[in-house]
Amino acid sequence: PGWTFSDGSPVTSDSFIKAWKFGALLSNAQLGSSFFERIKGFSYDEDSELTGLTKVDDLTFTVELTAPASDFKISLGHYAYYPMPDSAFKDMKAYGAKPVGNGPYRLISWDHDSRIVMEPNPAYAGGRTVANKGVTFKLYTSYDSVYNDLLAGAIDIADAVPDSFLPIFQKQLGERAINKPAAYFQGLAIDVTHEHWKMDEEGRARRAAICRAIDRDLICDKLYYGTRTPAKDFTAPTVAGWTAEVPGNEVLTYDPDEARRLWARAEAISTF
């Protein structure tokens, strides 16, 4: 109750429902549209309204998913789920150039390809306390430039470290360096519609052979210098419900001899 956007307009359940429906609609081509795929009514193939969103009153709405999802509550912190004021839908291009939010900061200026200046939002009604006079986001074209400015003290925070600095960033930055688990997953995918790689005995053996041939521990240790962890699932350990005990994930364990046996089994069925 009483929560407003930085332009003074009220934040209501419609602020979320309209924003989510806009973000999910195929023809709007929003980069975060995939975040709505678990909500009833979503479609990758045609314009389809999110029928899983139901308004209860001005401060309440319900969400119906197509299947249970243990991480849905956590995912709601992503920008794709932010509410938008009614003014956004009158001119979305203008809103994109000067967005209005309901968070602890509000936009002051945006010098495209250079910097974004924010100041504390006096209308913010949330539980976080702004402990500064504002934040300036500097925009870069390379992470090397970002990192060099970080070392020089020209910026306070960077959200990533260039690969070339992974071996030394913790020593260079000292207490400023952060290396903690995050809710990210990186992987390689094989198209199971291609010949020899399908969901049959040959394809399963061949894909398992590839998995067994990859030394993930060595890659994480030597290539990423301990800033990655070998995956055991398609989700990360930071996601609620994660477990390393996934049936079938033994193929993720490096075993070159088993890899050769599996490949030979696939070859015996059909030569690649």
Image (tube, grey):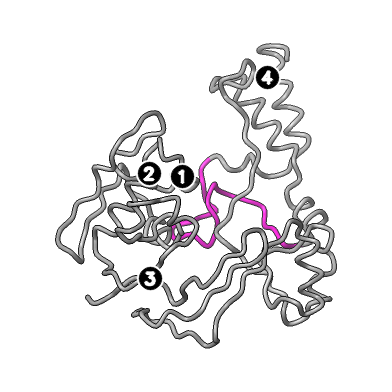
Label 3 packing within 10 angstroms: few (<14), some (14-19), many (20+): many
Earlier-in-chain disc, 4 versus 2:
2
Q: Nearer the viewer, residue 153 or 202?
A: 153
**Disc with the residue nearer the chain's start (4 vs 3):** 3
Using the image, determine if residue 69 lies above or below residue 10. Answer: above
SS for dot 3? loop
Is 203 covered by the magenta stretch?
Answer: no
Q: Which residue is mark 4?
A: 266
Query: In the rendered view, does 121 fall on the left or right side of 272?
Result: left
Whether 93 is drawn above or below 168: the answer is above
Q: Residue at x 62, y 22 (%)?
A: 197
Q: Nearer the viewer, residue 89 or 219?
A: 89
* Vertical relation: 216 (above or below) 227: above
Q: Main secondary structure of the magenta part?
A: loop
Q: Amino acid at mark 2?
A: Ala
Image coordinates for residue 179, horizontal then vertical, percent: 68, 69
Quickly name the residue at label 1.
Answer: 30
State the residue position of label 2.
24
Q: Quadrant of the N terminus?
A: bottom left
Name the mark nearer the viewer: 4 or 3: 3
Q: CA distance from mark 4 to mark 1?
A: 41 Å
Residue linked to disc 3 = 102
Label 2: which secondary element: helix
- Tell me which segment is drawn in magenta: 226-247
- Residue 181 numbered mark, or none: none
- Disc 1 to disc 2, how far (Cα)? 7 Å
Q: Residues within 10 Å of mark 4 (few under 14, many from 20)?
A: many
Residue 240 located within the stretch drawn in magenta: yes
For residue 28, side relative to residue 115 (left or right): left
